[in-house]
């Protein structure tokens, strides 16, 4: 309801003003008949002048509204009071907006399809010693950075604005002169409902290449979580993977990539149980399951040992190698999305880190 009062009649007022400002003028000039002309003039300043309406007509209409408001306040003996905006806002925000019982075929349906519950408007004694201060404002960071493809909104620049009464109001972002799909530095204009604007700088950075290619396997080095969305929230955790020894680390297949609202890279993955979601891409937590560079020697970790093979497909069996055995390596070969170590005897073994480990 507070938002309704603050924004519904915006077409009737100049930018930055609302029905609250109109009511404030009524209370300011209540019981001050000698200052009627000044009160009408103040009210006329905030009223939007419709095209084709003469100054005389505007003044006449504003005067009628002013006199009506003053009469209401005087009749109820509220001359020494003013709106307690804090209490009124709290009261208004606690009331619900509900669907009207109007039929959708009713010509007034589009205008009045919502209705609000009644609420109190609280008053408090006037404070005459302090002048009314215009609290209109717009603050924002002078510059911000995003990664190619990310969206931009007021939060990107920590933009905040208030109207003349100090209430928070929306800030819009004009990115018409920025190409969010192309790296570069661009000027962006922030505009608040109170009419204030601010030109800021947006830097669009190239997206870094993913650490692990799509469809390759990774495992968790530390405790991690699987999330429903790329912007992590503890209420959207789908699974927990605890830190464990190397041979039992949880594995995932990278199926895609995404970024959080702040630009952090996430892996879109599927675990060995078939669960899908997003995990961190930080190298301190996630690493490829298969070695990507050759080493000089490896030691067998698997308790059951491993087999060596005559071919890269690992289909033509060679020798069985027991756990703890050290093997000399002369190269690394890629096979589809995995890798193999080529041994000094010409045979091949899997370069899966859960099965073998590089040693000096």
Image: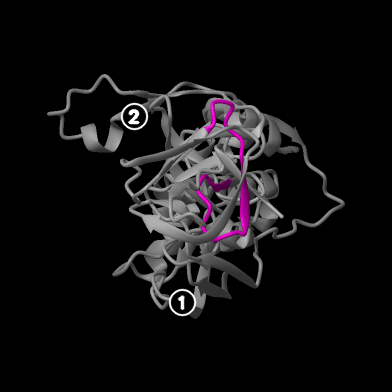
Left or right: where 65 falls relative to 30? left
Q: Position of residue 128 (x, y in %)?
A: 83, 49
Residue positioned 35% across, 64% down in the render: 50
Element carrying mark 2:
strand
291 part of magenta stretch: yes
Left or right: where 325 falls relative to 111? right
Q: Which mark is residue 183?
A: 1
Seen from the viewer's position, the closer of residues 5 and 258 is 258
Q: Is residue 169 visible?
A: yes
Seen from the viewer's position, the closer of residues 253 and 176 is 253
Residue at numbered disc 2: 114
**Would you place residue 184 above or below residue 157 in this image?**
below
Residue 155 figure quarter: bottom right
Region of the chain picked out in magenta, as a range: 287-305
Seen from the viewer's position, the closer of residues 86 and 268 is 268
Element carrying mark 1:
loop
């Amino acid at each position: 309801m507070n938002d309704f009062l603050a924004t519904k009649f915006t077409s009737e007022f100049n930018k930055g003003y609302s029905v609250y400002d109109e009511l404030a003028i009524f209370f300011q000039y209540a019981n001050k008949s000698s200052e009627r002309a000044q009160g009408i003039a103040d009210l006329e300043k905030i009223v939007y002048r419709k095209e084709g309406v003469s100054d005389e007509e505007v003044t006449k209409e504003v005067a009628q509204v002013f006199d009506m408001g003053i009469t209401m306040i005087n009749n109820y003996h509220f001359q020494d009071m003013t709106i307690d905006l804090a209490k009124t806002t709290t009261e208004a925000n606690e009331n619900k907006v509900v669907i009207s019982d109007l039929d959708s075929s009713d010509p007034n349906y589009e205008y009045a399809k919502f209705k609000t519950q009644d609420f109190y408007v609280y008053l408090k004694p006037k404070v005459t010693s302090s002048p009314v201060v215009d609290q209109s404002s717009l603050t924002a960071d002078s510059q911000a950075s995003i990664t190619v493809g990310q969206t931009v909104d007021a939060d990107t620049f920590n933009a905040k604005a208030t109207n003349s009464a100090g209430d928070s109001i929306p800030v819009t972002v004009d990115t018409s002169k920025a190409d969010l799909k192309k790296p570069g530095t661009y000027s962006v204009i922030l505009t608040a409902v109170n009419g204030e604007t601010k030109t800021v700088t947006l830097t669009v950075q190239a997206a870094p290449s993913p650490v692990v290619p799509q469809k390759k396997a990774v495992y968790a080095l530390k405790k991690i979580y699987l999330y429903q969305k790329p912007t992590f929230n503890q209420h959207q955790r789908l699974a927990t993977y605890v830190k464990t020894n190397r041979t039992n680390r949880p594995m995932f297949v990278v199926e895609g990539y995404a970024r959080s609202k702040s630009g952090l890279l996430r892996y879109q993955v599927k675990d060995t149980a078939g669960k899908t979601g997003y995990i961190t891409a930080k190298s301190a937590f996630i690493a490829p399951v298969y070695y990507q560079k050759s080493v000089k020697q490896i030691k067998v970790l698997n308790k059951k040992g491993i087999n060596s093979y005559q071919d890269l497909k690992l289909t033509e069996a060679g020798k069985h190698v027991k756990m703890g055995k050290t093997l000399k390596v002369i190269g690394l070969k890629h096979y589809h999305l995995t890798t193999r170590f080529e041994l000094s005897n010409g045979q091949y073994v899997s370069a899966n880190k859960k099965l073998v480990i590089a040693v000096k």
